[in-house]
Amino acid sequence: MPTRHWDIFCTVIDNLGDIATCWRLAQILHHEHGQHVRLFVDELNALKTLVPAAQSTAQQTLYGIEVRQWTESFPDTQPAQVVIETFGCTLPASYVRAMQATPPLAWINLEYMSCEDWVDNIHNHDSILAHGLKKRFIIPSLRAHGGGLLRESDLLRRRDDFLSHPAQQRAWCEQWNIPLPIGGANSLKLSLFGYENPQFAPFLHDLSQAPQPITAYLPQSRLLNSLREYLHNPDLSAGDTYQHGSLTLHILPFLPQAEYDRLLWLCDINFVRGEESLTRAIWAGKPFIWHIYPTDDHAHQVKLNAFLEVYTEHGEDEHLQHLRAWMQQWNGLPSATEVDICSGLNMLIQHQEWHQRRSTELAQRPNLCQQLMDFVAFVPATG
Amino acid sequence: MKTAQEFRPGNVMLIDGSPWVILKADFSKSGRNSAIVKMKLKNLLSGTSTETVYKADDKFEQVILDKKECTYSYFADPLYVFMDEDFNSYEVEKDNLGDVINFMVDGMDDKVEVTFYDGKAISAELPNTIVREIVYTEPANRGDTSGKVMKVGKLANGHEIQIASFIEIGEKVSIDSRTGEYRCRA
């Protein structure tokens, strides 16, 4: 496809998932598909957290992406050929007026991932707006007729390469000051990334009673608040280690987006939050427990259960039932069975291959960025 | 201006200068996703139909058309015939009624608002709350009176809805005509 100009609009609401997804999409569009991408984001600091090379300047080029700060007084801007509004953000009125004067080739409304039934009914449908412009709804999803997930084309190859080279792994751990597991090969490695979670305290207690040594890595996130509360120590921060019984827990600094994958690849089981890190956990091919973003209306409960059904393909194996129950329990939902943490860990470890196979299967499907490229390539007319 | 979620079947919205009547509107809300309304629309000028999706807060101008309060008389395929208090009859095409036809039953005495465009009856709206008889349903599970357990109930026109498990054949139920959902025993 010829090089086209894309504008991606992102507002940072409370966490980093939205900008993380937008940044990854911009990177794939540019580096894999040769597209020219301009990313408008309101909170540059959020981008800096993920991409340390980002500056606080209102306009910059970062790894080939033109990044602009999205300010309230939005300057007159010539719209790109493809416009993506992400996660319910509202485009600046002046920009929409400019689109009416020069309609883009495609205007895309990118929503959050969902595996619920309604996705089949909404994904890939057009919205015919009051001013006559059309906007295409795209819903990332694991559903067969959904929008897929973001994935770099060489991601699984890079993962497998990293995992088959222990020297690379050691070098990476040294580079990021990540302590190697205590107990060597017998030690179970967990990564812990999440929101504050009342399930965390009993979970840590159970880990400390495990029959095998457990090394847990907790990159700075809101879950650290739960650890501080559990240990009555508000000063805990990156670099600190907590050791009790079988458990050794290292607090890591927040890892740049480009490095987080390697932590997921190294660990045996990953605890992730939101949708960007969920997606990366799926591609890591390791068992994972997802802490979904909780909403006040409890709509996240339906969303989590839909995800679990689709991800596990409605499987009735004991392992899959167990996985669903644990994820429900981790999110405070009613679950069919009470999960014992230690036996739960062992069951997930015994079924690592299932997750690797599932990751490979899902990677056979068109990924989200490819679907966007295909849509733009075949879109018939402007307006 | 009204938001997409405020429109309902039978309303007419202005899109790119053309009036479109809403034949069907389904609402979805999931997690952090925008609330989304999927609509089936018919262009009143060209007669073409389309399906479209909107964020619930997308804004549109509503076209206010003449309306008349009528009662339902009879169905002569493909036309539903309504009558006003002066005994004038108006025909509305079945395809223009969208989900309204799910609740059209012989002998119903609801006041129906028939909408006119260019002198022609183009759609009809039911009251928000309607009462219909359940003509068939499976027996209830013994002991459940919570109203939380649902089962299928059939209306006189054959349309099926989810109703509370304690409702029995011959009973009347209250239905929200906008969503098609059972509300309570009438």
Image (tube, rainbow, N blue to C red):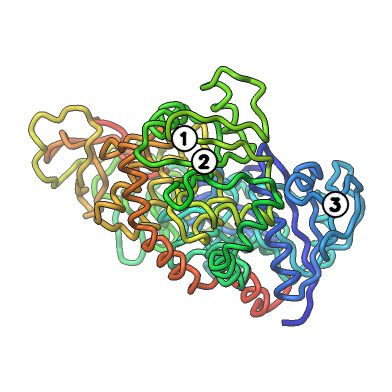
Labels 1, 2: front one = 1
Which residue extends farthest top?
A232
Are the residues at dot 1 and dot 2 in contact (C-beta closer than 8 Å)?
yes
Are the residues at dot 3 and dot 2 in contact (C-beta closer than 8 Å)?
no
Gap between marks 1 and 3 measured at Cα? 55 Å
- The residue that appears at 58% across and 61% down in the rendered structure is A138
Q: Picture coordinates of residue A179 (x, y %)?
A: 61, 44
Check disc 2 and give the amino acid type. Ala
Residue B170, located in which quarter of the rendered image? top left
A202 and A295: which is toward the camera: A202
- Tell me if I can see residue A333 in this picture: yes
Q: Picture coordinates of residue B146 (x, y %)?
A: 21, 27
**Are labels 1 and 3 on one chain?**
yes
Gap between marks 3 and 2 measured at Cα? 49 Å
Labels 1, 3: front one = 1
State left or right for residue B85 relative to residue B15: left
State left or right for residue A53 relative to residue A374: right
Q: Which mark is residue A263?
A: none
- The residue that appears at 54% across and 27% down in the rendered structure is A226
Q: Picture coordinates of residue A47 (x, y %)?
A: 77, 48
B82 and B176: which is toward the camera: B176
Q: Which residue is mark 2?
A: A216
Q: Which residue is mark 3?
A: A94
Q: Which mark is residue A247?
A: 1
- The residue that appears at 63% across and 63% down in the rendered structure is A168
Of the residues under marks 1 and 2, which one precedes in the sequence?
2
A271 and B13: which is toward the camera: A271
